[in-house]
């Protein structure tokens, strides 16, 4: 393994632990997409187009979770114009786009266009269309519409397995409603003889719920197709000035782009400080193509700094909670050196 491959390897799935998984897609197209997802960053393969796009359908949310920027730095309410969404999908359809996530800062089920977005993506060859949701608004009607549109995966953010813990974290949420909605989605799939959408339930591990982790896994494993635990990251950011003893190269620079509701394009999911300060804007989809941005000088310069082990020279990366955790775990001997 080359030094660059080691740097990439350190950062893969940095804050994410899958503890239960069933219902994975085994089709050749899906397997090839996941192969590129894992291998392109290690080999430094850029390609003509990102493998994945995060297309921010809307910025607003129906909850105020204590650890989320929506509770302390909420963004201005915006909804991505369908014409802009279609521009991204139409370009991607011609250039090998594999997957999309139709959200970034907001709750996708608040967006009145969400079902249409999923349907349009699937009709135009996207292999995997998905989004994260708090599932409070996942009504029977909405579940059936999303299934009909072709949704491949739904990632339900549920930070507890008891009412007391869940509702102390997901402020404004209702635990019984969430459990009912997720069970109902699985029931509808079974009635229709379908495996999709794959239902993942995941928690962000915080001081309020980490003591529940094993109980959480036992509670949700019989209900969901996948159960995962994520580490809580700092969205406000604490900048480090020192050059680290170890470095890593972020795979996201070879995998994805984030397109905000206003058309601004970011290089990764951590390119904002809170929900309002954009740390690294590569361009705007309204007046550029995604291929131009993906293969442009700005993003290539960021990739080159990561190749050289100099991500600390990029403010966005110095503030990144993922990078900080990887470096801490590397020095502690928990990751590839």
Image: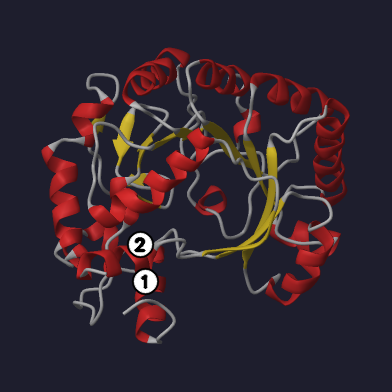
Residue that badge 2 annotates? 320
Q: Which residue is mark 1?
A: 324
Residue 130 vertical position relative to residue 252 in the rendered view, above or below: above
Residue at 82% x, 66% y is 218
Label 2 to label 1: alpha-carbon separation: 6 Å
Residue 315: name its quadrant.
bottom left
- Relative to 137, 122 lies left or right: left
Residue positioned 80% across, 22% down in the render: 141
**60 versus 147 height, above or below:** below
Label 1 near label 2: C-beta < 8 Å? Answer: yes
How many residues crowd around disc 1 within 10 Å: few (fewer than 14), some, or many (20 or more)? many
Quarter of the image with the C terminus is bottom left
Query: Which quadrant of the figure has residue 92?
Result: top left
Give the residue displayed 39% in from the left and 33% down from the top: 260
Residue 213 rendering spot, x and y as whole percentages? 72, 71
Mark 2 is surrounded, within 10 Å at the Cα level, by few (under 14), some (14 to 19) or many (20 or more) other residues, namely: many
SS at circle 1: helix
Q: Does 116 sit left or right of 56 as displayed?
A: right
Mark 2 secondary-structure assignment:
loop
Q: Quadrant of the N terminus?
A: bottom left
Question: Which x, y percent locates residue 56?
Answer: 46, 32
Q: Which of the pair 175/311 is nearer the observer?
A: 311
Residue plotted at (41% across, 61% down): 12
Which mark, residue 293? none
In the rendered view, does 93 fall on the left or right side of 160? Answer: left
């Amino acid at each position: 393994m080359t030094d660059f491959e080691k740097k990439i390897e350190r950062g893969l799935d940095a804050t994410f632990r899958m503890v239960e998984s069933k219902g994975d897609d085994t089709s050749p197209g899906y397997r090839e997409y996941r192969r590129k997802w894992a291998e392109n960053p290690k080999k430094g393969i850029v390609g003509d187009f990102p493998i994945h796009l995060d297309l921010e359908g809307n910025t607003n949310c129906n909850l105020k979770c204590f650890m989320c920027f929506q509770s302390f730095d909420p963004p201005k309410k915006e909804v991505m114009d369908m014409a802009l969404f279609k521009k991204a999908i139409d370009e991607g359809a011609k250039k090998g786009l594999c997957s999309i996530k139709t959200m970034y800062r907001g709750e996708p089920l608040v967006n009145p266009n969400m079902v249409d977005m999923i349907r349009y993506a699937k009709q135009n060859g996207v292999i995997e269309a998905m989004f994260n949701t708090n599932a409070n608004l996942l009504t029977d009607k909405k579940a059936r519409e999303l299934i009909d549109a072709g949704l491949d995966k739904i990632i339900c953010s549920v930070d507890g397995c008891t009412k007391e813990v869940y509702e102390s974290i997901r402020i404004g949420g209702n635990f019984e409603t969430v459990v009912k909605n997720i069970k109902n989605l699985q029931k509808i799939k079974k009635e229709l003889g379908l495996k999709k959408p794959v239902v993942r339930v995941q928690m962000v591990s915080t001081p309020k719920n980490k003591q529940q982790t094993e109980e959480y896994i036992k509670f949700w494993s019989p209900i969901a197709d996948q159960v995962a635990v994520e580490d809580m990251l700092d969205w406000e950011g604490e900048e480090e000035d020192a050059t680290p003893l170890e470095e890593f190269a972020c795979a996201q620079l070879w995998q994805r782009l984030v397109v905000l509701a206003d058309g601004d394009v970011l290089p990764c999911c951590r390119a904002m400080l809170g929900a309002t300060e954009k740390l690294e804007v590569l361009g705007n989809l309204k007046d550029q193509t995604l291929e131009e941005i993906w293969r442009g000088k700005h993003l290539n310069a960021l990739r080159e700094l990561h190749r050289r082990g100099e991500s600390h020279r990029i403010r966005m990366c110095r503030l990144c909670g993922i990078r900080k955790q990887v470096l801490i775990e590397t020095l502690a001997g928990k990751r590839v050196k």
